[in-house]
Amino acid sequence: MTIAEQFHASGTALLQRTPALDGQDPERKRAEIADYYAAVSDRYESLFQTLACDQAFYEKAIPLRHPLIFYYGHTATFFVNKLVLAKLLPERIDPRLESIFAVGVDEMSWDDLDETHYDWPSVAEVKAYRDKVRAAVLHLINTLPLQLPITWDSTWWPVIMGIEHELIHLETSTVLIRQHRLEYLRAHPDWRPSHEHAHAPVNELLPVPAGRVQLGKPRKASMYGWDNEFGLRETELEEFKASRYLVSNGEFLGFVKAGGYQNDAFWDEEGTQWLQFAQATHPTFWVPGAQWRLRLMTDEVEMRWDWPAEVNYHEAKAFCNWKAEQTGEPIRLPTEDEWYRLYDVAGVNEVPADATAAANLQLDHGASSCPVNRFAHGDFFDVVGNVWQWTETPMYPFDGFEVHPLYDDFTTPTFDNQHNLIKGGSWVSCGNETLRSARYAFRRHFFQHAGFRYVSSHAQAIEPNAYYESDRQMSEYAEFHYGETWFNVANFPAAVAQLCIEVMGDRPAHSALDLGCASGRATFELARHFDQVTGVDFSARFVSQGVEMAEQGVLRYTLTEEGDLVSYRTATLEQHGLADTVGKVAFFQGDACNLKPQLTGYDLIMAVNLIDRLYNPGQFLGQVHQRINLGGLLVVASPYTWLEEHTPKAQWIGGYKKDGESYTTLDGLRDILGSHFVQVGDPRKLEFVIRETQHKFQHSFSEVTVWERIR
Amino acid sequence: MTIAEQFHASGTALLQRTPALDGQDPERKRAEIADYYAAVSDRYESLFQTLACDQAFYEKAIPLRHPLIFYYGHTATFFVNKLVLAKLLPERIDPRLESIFAVGVDEMSWDDLDETHYDWPSVAEVKAYRDKVRAAVLHLINTLPLQLPITWDSTWWPVIMGIEHELIHLETSTVLIRQHRLEYLRAHPDWRPSHEHAHAPVNELLPVPAGRVQLGKPRKASMYGWDNEFGLRETELEEFKASRYLVSNGEFLGFVKAGGYQNDAFWDEEGTQWLQFAQATHPTFWVPGAQWRLRLMTDEVEMRWDWPAEVNYHEAKAFCNWKAEQTGEPIRLPTEDEWYRLYDVAGVNEVPADATAAANLQLDHGASSCPVNRFAHGDFFDVVGNVWQWTETPMYPFDGFEVHPLYDDFTTPTFDNQHNLIKGGSWVSCGNETLRSARYAFRRHFFQHAGFRYVSSHAQAIEPNAYYESDRQMSEYAEFHYGETWFNVANFPAAVAQLCIEVMGDRPAHSALDLGCASGRATFELARHFDQVTGVDFSARFVSQGVEMAEQGVLRYTLTEEGDLVSYRTATLEQHGLADTVGKVAFFQGDACNLKPQLTGYDLIMAVNLIDRLYNPGQFLGQVHQRINLGGLLVVASPYTWLEEHTPKAQWIGGYKKDGESYTTLDGLRDILGSHFVQVGDPRKLEFVIRETQHKFQHSFSEVTVWERIR
């Protein structure tokens, strides 16, 4: 009898933990993974046994999501999809069902109704399909060559991925079931709630000492992880205070009674919008009546005042604002960093492989929450487990983030500053979800088995940079400035900056202006040599890239591969050896044809790929000497791509017939700049390449001319 | 006393001929050129002495052109411009005047009014400027190192160019003076008309035997030539008949009296439009009255009935149509080729250097026409001289045509099928204009000292290809298919065709289809291997490029260098070793998504850079097997640049997420083509480069996949 069979037979055995991916005995690991898969799959089956009739599978629990029949089939299809993609399955098991069950409804907005119409298959048909998939997966597990450790790029990675994916849906399906009509549901021995409850304990704020936290999972970690967990973040935290307990229903009642749901002052803009849409007056699982009752998964029970309040981010945040007003303290939700500090200070450990969890996690303590004062962790309770805990931190990637090639959209769609991290796991969180390294995020209005702990801190909850630039032009330029090189053409902004530094020689190098700085690479490059460099661009969006790079040291963007398919890139100052330059640069929005007076006194002005994008290049060139010190340099680089959409033809400074003869832009530059500059050296042509898709590039030459101000 | 001084002093001496550019004695040649310049410049001065008052310089002779003051200054400014461009003059002589006198009004249309407003300088100021220029040019001629022969790329070429340019304006200014008000003019001893006249002779058609003519001037010719004269054309002509005389005013009177100007049947569409605009009822220099009189340069005299009728092309053509109707013979204007045949048959020679011309040319016989039966050339009269002769042939370039870098718009603006060649020269044609090789063209409605001879021939007057493609996309593709290579990337259509031929191996190679053939290069390339190749494109304009290449073996186009500046390119099948393939190719307009049924039974179908430009690529790919023989090949190449402007997103065959997973175009190709094809070999990526400007290129990869039809 395998471990899984033992577990299943007993009905009380612990649900198997996510396996370590290293070890000395591949065959033993193979068996462990087989057992893990079987256990998870069995438990998923048993969850759907709580549905009392076929109708329960087909009627939607909430209008925003597919009916449960979809989720019943989906985890099997996902497994097949990833194995086909990984070329571990030679062909699909049931193409029709696999098309139906492929894509869930990502609830991105509270009014994104699921209006897809499907001809759903019967429950029996899906069960048969699930069985077929299970057999195929088990066959694969039993036969696929296995080398330890299993790593990110191992053939076994998608196998673990498929199991962990089913565990995610195990949890989200319990939420949907909890939102389903009670008459569709029935009790099930695997899914019995806790009966423990009493009065709510009085909460209090306890100090958490200052200290350093380290987040992120190394690539060689011994447990499976999703893409967003890998990488590294280290940061110092000031002392703060945190509530001893999660906020209980009892504590939350104060907010409800105080009219918190009716007072816009406690809700931010997005929260107010949600409130207006949802018309909520209390937590979603509270059932109003003569006495408040509480909706559990398959039951409705009298209110558990000492269980955690389950709310969305907006409700949690509004509570904190109310609490801050009440107490005069800087009460707010914790950041992700603060949660980790609490975890470290409380001395929490991972769920043991072969003993009951010291927290309400992994279904070890039943299929519901339990009192907030049941599991102590140091001075605190429920640092992990019971319900997820909302944080102030939107999902963002750690340095070194990469998507997994077999699942490139697991996290990336949530790098939008609209998905906040939840930490700690709930009673139904299993496998990867229970780990310290786990990072899941949901839209802020979303309901999960999630509550919150509050903290008191004068430190601002800073939102890390999570934005992936996906505007085509912006991301092409991010790549142009900080990305790969193509056709052996050196990075262009760096090359021009280098050329500038070379021609500067021993001249004074106090300040430089990078006009038309775009994503700012040359601004940073010039700061290797100059004391102060200003980057100015007409486009505020470009300027924001420079600012982001300066403030965060990192820029994230998507690149078009083919059609709508994109890849995800991260560029850092560090990788280009530019981290030291941050203190010497500043970026501003500005118009080269109408610069602010204070932008003056430069030893160098660089105008790269600028003049043929100005509406009046002659005006700019005719006045630029006023901003350059005598003996200072002007460097102009341009492919001379004159286009009427940017520059009216009457304003072109060359590239036409003048008095019957060809008059080039270089002629124009010489005529305009001649009154205040002498040309230094000969024009040079520098190549540059801008990537548009994996197959398409702009490959151009920019003519570089150097001018010394002499009068 | 120099030759020029002798000439000027005598008042009867011959105007010096255009110098031979070779010789053994550079210093003698230097003196000859100095004399030639002085003589031409003097004669130009003397022409403007026919203007009786300053007002004559400033009032326009015709509303379409600048006043004569412009032409007085223009030839000097042109000389300076070319010498500055050639870096033979260190700086301008008078920038203000040189801006005013730079650009003439090209009378491109009969209603292009010259509405430029200038603050013209005084005549004395222009005279002083001309003197300064003359001194500078003579100084240059006296000091510039000279090696013989003077060739196209010699430093001396612009010197001769400047002199010959002044001779052109010497002639065109006589026309403007002839159109000026008589009270503004005065007689001048250098510009006395002929007084010889009598009754018009009766014209007759004489046979011209069949034979071969050779046109075009070799690069090593010993006389100066304009760009359009160089190159080579050889052709065989059938026998035809030509009128013994140019059409005299007397002969033309028949057409006028017959109501020729009132009968639309004799005028083609453009001619009818001109007639409606001009409201002409007789030749422009005829003065109506009790008796017809004739306007000469500075006089009006009684009608010279035996002098040549001076008309524009439309009037000459209408006369021929009338004459054809009268005689029942295929009367028309000669082609340029036919004029050369007549020249050769008549035994005409160039104007001798040191004797009077045997024709009314080079001002040797006064400043007007003379009787059409005055100068016999073999059996004919006035094969050269007296007045220019309109031909049916629009200006076109010979094989090997190149623009001169110092004057790139001498001829190219007239490659528009709207400028017809005039041949033979007039009484005032000097220098290059008198040579057999001379080729000048004017808009067909334009008046010059020009008349015509008619021919009778059943041969069609075929218009040679004179068109320079200047549409950006069309010319970029012409260059892409037939032009230079960039970044060491081999010619792409040729490389794909070569790849097709290689994978064909020993398979039957009767017929191939090049779908999306664009400018047709691959169609020709495939014909190296296949018996028959069809090129099909959705764009009729692209198809016309293939047709033109097949029919004429040559494609001409402009390429953008920078802004509006272009260069001129000529591509030939010959240069790519493809002249032999012409008989095996055919081009048609067609829609790949809706092909004509007869396009079937192919051993190869090539679809290069096509599928991502179709509105329904899936439909095309799903049906293409029907047109390929079993065992035949389909070759698809594409950069997969899906754009909604070409292909609605619903029709993309890949490049999106499908059932949650990345679905590439290659996946789509495999799924669609799988039912009828097997893939042969692995996909390959071929680079291609499309030039946009001298500094900007598209640099892309096209993925090539090969598919064998198996069912």
Image: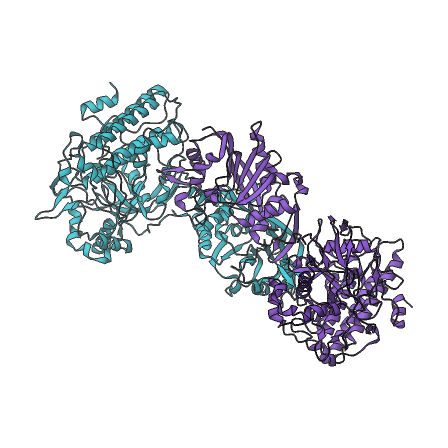
Chain colours: A cyan, B purple
Give whichever of B343, A448 is nearer the camera.
Answer: B343
Q: Where residue B214 sits in the image (x, y, percent)?
A: 77, 50
Residue B528 image-quadrant placement: top right
Outermost top residue: A1
Q: Where residue B303 sits in the image (x, y, percent)?
A: 76, 75
- The residue under the point 37% across, 47% down is A464
Query: Up-down: is A651 above or below A479?
Result: below
Image quadrant in which the C terminus of chain A is located: bottom right
Query: Up-down: is A474 above or below B169?
Result: above
Instruction: Kindly tell me whether residue A25 is visible in this rendering.
Output: no
Give whichever of B227, B527 is nearer the camera.
Answer: B527
Q: Taking A294 as reference, is B562 left or right?
A: right
- The residue under the point 26% across, 28% down is A41
Q: Where residue B666 sits in the image (x, y, percent)?
A: 45, 36
Outermost right residue: B1
Query: Up-down: is A98 above or below B39?
Result: above
Query: Up-down: is A152 above or below A598?
Result: above
Instruction: Kindly tell me whether residue B457 is visible in this rendering.
Output: yes
Q: Taking A320 as reference, is B284 left or right?
A: right
Q: Taking A543 as reference, is A43 left or right?
A: left
Q: Where residue B632 sits in the image (x, y, percent)?
A: 51, 30
Image quadrant in which the N terminus of chain A is located: top left
